[in-house]
Image (cartoon, rainbow, N blue to C red):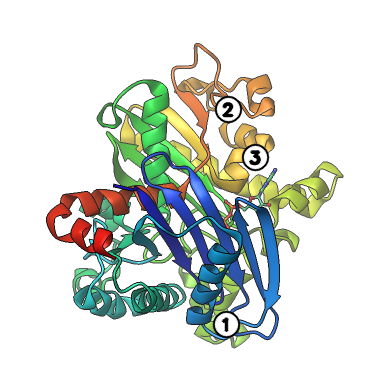
């Protein structure tokens, strides 16, 4: 049987896709349709002919997915042999701790979770609806960003507020980036030559969004993002941790609406708020040129990471490795160095040359805690989990997939 999975990540105005082998991780094609609903849509398709860029008007997500299919038939590879579709879904609430096969009941359950992720879940659901219409013969699986963190113990996921906030209204920590944390944790264990169950890790996913996770024996036991992706580390445009009384202060003293505050904290805070820029490369170039705002933004960003490393070290008791991943984590030697310098008494010893060279292991040979740089691969993880679910349900599903 083929192990090819089409992975779909539908955003509000974009649709990313990857045709990937769930076993080997080899991507036969990937791409992106952007500016859905605007007059000037854009498609990028990477396949056997290299990268093909097309400008076209894309009114809806259905048009976007049809454009993806057109790209496959015009530029390859063949779509034959695709056994399933794996969808990234941001919020699975407390209900979904594992990937699920998509059916009407599941769609209804994810629709009920929209208030928890009003920016993301509606777009993910639209991607699911469209894909079910266009590929009725293929099994489809939802993989949730929150699922990996469903193992958090109550003391880590419960906020110190009246318990009915949690029990009646779902106000609790869920955590995000779970697909990435799961992938990178498994890779780290493999690199250390041990099973996932034997290692304790602090995983730092530093992209546009940033999160830290404490992983004990392959299981997430605490994570920095909360009920929403706003909590925790400093991010491209999000503030991360903040005194919750600041909301009331801004409303009372500046006359802002709650929506104004929410928008500012999500879209014009973090690096952008501090230095006017959320692209880390540009920020770092300004810092290197002596710009004090860029330097302060960098310092706050790294200091916050260091605080979480300390906190999660205490949570775990012993740490085998600290793992950096995603755009900034994989590429910025200065961030890795500034975040971990001064932690030598905790057994964290960076090798400056390895760090600058961007090696896989950037700690010294005798460092009690290994420091690793591992590229994340969320698409492969989604394909892998989709395939695994398909195999568990083999009797009914494989017949459908092969018959389609
Ligand atoms: P997303 O969360 O959108 O998937 P990525 O993981 O791609 O984000 O990370 C995007 C961030 O990584 C951007 O801030 C970008 O500037 C930063 N980045 C990418 N390459 C580098 C680099 N070579 N050095 C420093 N930062 C980088």
Marks 1, 3: nearer the viewer? 3
- Residue position marked by numbered label 2 in the rendering: 342
Q: State whether label 3 is within 8 Å of ligand 1.
A: yes
Left or right? Give the position of 325 relative to 368.
right
- Residue position marked by numbered label 1 in the rendering: 260
* Residue 289 seen in render: yes
| Mark 1 Cα-neighbour bin, 10 Å: few <14, some 14–19, many ≥20 | some
Seen in the picture, residue 42 relative to 256 is either above or below; the reply is: above
Q: Residue at x 57, y 86 (%)?
A: 59
Cα distance in 3D space between marks 2 and 3: 21 Å
Cα distance in 3D space between marks 1 and 3: 33 Å
Left or right? Give the position of 297 relative to 142.
right
Cα distance in 3D space between marks 1 and 2: 39 Å
Left or right? Give the position of 54 relative to 27.
right
Q: Are marks 1 and 2 in contact (CB under 8 Å)?
A: no
* Residue 173 seen in render: no
- Residue position marked by numbered label 3 in the rendering: 331
**SS class, disc 3:** helix
Pick whichever, 330 or 70, lies toward us.
70
């Amino acid at each position: 049987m083929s192990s090819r999975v089409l992975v779909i990540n539908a955003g509000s105005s974009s649709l990313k896709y990857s045709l990937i082998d769930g076993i080997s991780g080899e991507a036969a094609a990937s791409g992106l349709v952007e500016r859905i609903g605007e007059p000037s849509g854009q498609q990028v398709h990477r396949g056997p002919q290299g990268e093909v860029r097309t400008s076209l008007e894309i009114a809806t997500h259905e048009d976007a997915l049809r454009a993806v299919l057109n790209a496959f038939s015009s530029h390859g590879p063949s779509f034959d042999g695709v056994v399933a579709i794996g969808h990234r879904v941001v919020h699975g609430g407390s209900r979904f701790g594992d990937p699920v096969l998509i059916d009407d009941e599941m769609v209804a359950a994810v629709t009920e979770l929209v208030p928890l992720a009003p920016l993301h879940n509606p777009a993910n659901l639209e991607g699911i609806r469209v894909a079910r219409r266009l590929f009725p013969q293929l099994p489809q699986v939802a993989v949730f960003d929150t699922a990996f963190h469903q193992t958090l113990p109550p003391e880590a996921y419960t906020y110190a507020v009246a318990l009915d906030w949690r029990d009646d209204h779902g106000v609790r920590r869920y955590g995000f980036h779970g697909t990435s944390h799961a992938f990178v944790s498994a890779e780290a264990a493999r690199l250390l030559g041990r099973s996932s169950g034997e290692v304790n890790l602090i995983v730092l996913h530093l992209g546009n969004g940033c999160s830290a996770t404490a992983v004990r024996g392959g299981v997430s036991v605490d994570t920095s993002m909360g009920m929403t992706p706003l909590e925790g580390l400093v991010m491209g445009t999000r503030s991360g941790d903040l005194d919750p009384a600041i909301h009331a202060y801004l409303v009372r003293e500046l006359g802002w609406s709650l929506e104004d505050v929410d928008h500012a904290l999500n879209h014009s805070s973090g690096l952008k708020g501090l230095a006017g820029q959320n692209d880390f490369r540009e920020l770092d170039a300004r810092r290197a040129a002596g710009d004090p705002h860029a330097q302060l933004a960098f310092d706050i960003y790294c200091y916050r990471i260091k605080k979480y490393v300390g906190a999660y070290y205490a949570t775990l008791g012993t740490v085998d490795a600290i793992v950096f991943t995603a755009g900034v984590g994989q590429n910025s030697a200065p961030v890795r160095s500034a975040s971990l310098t001064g932690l030598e008494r905790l057994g964290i010893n960076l090798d400056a040359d390895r760090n600058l060279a961007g090696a896989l292991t950037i700690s010294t040979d005798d460092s009690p805690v290994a420091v690793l740089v591992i590229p994340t691969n969320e698409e492969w993880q989604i394909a892998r989990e989709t395939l695994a679910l398909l195999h568990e349900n083999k009797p009914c599903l494989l017949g459908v997939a092969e018959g389609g």
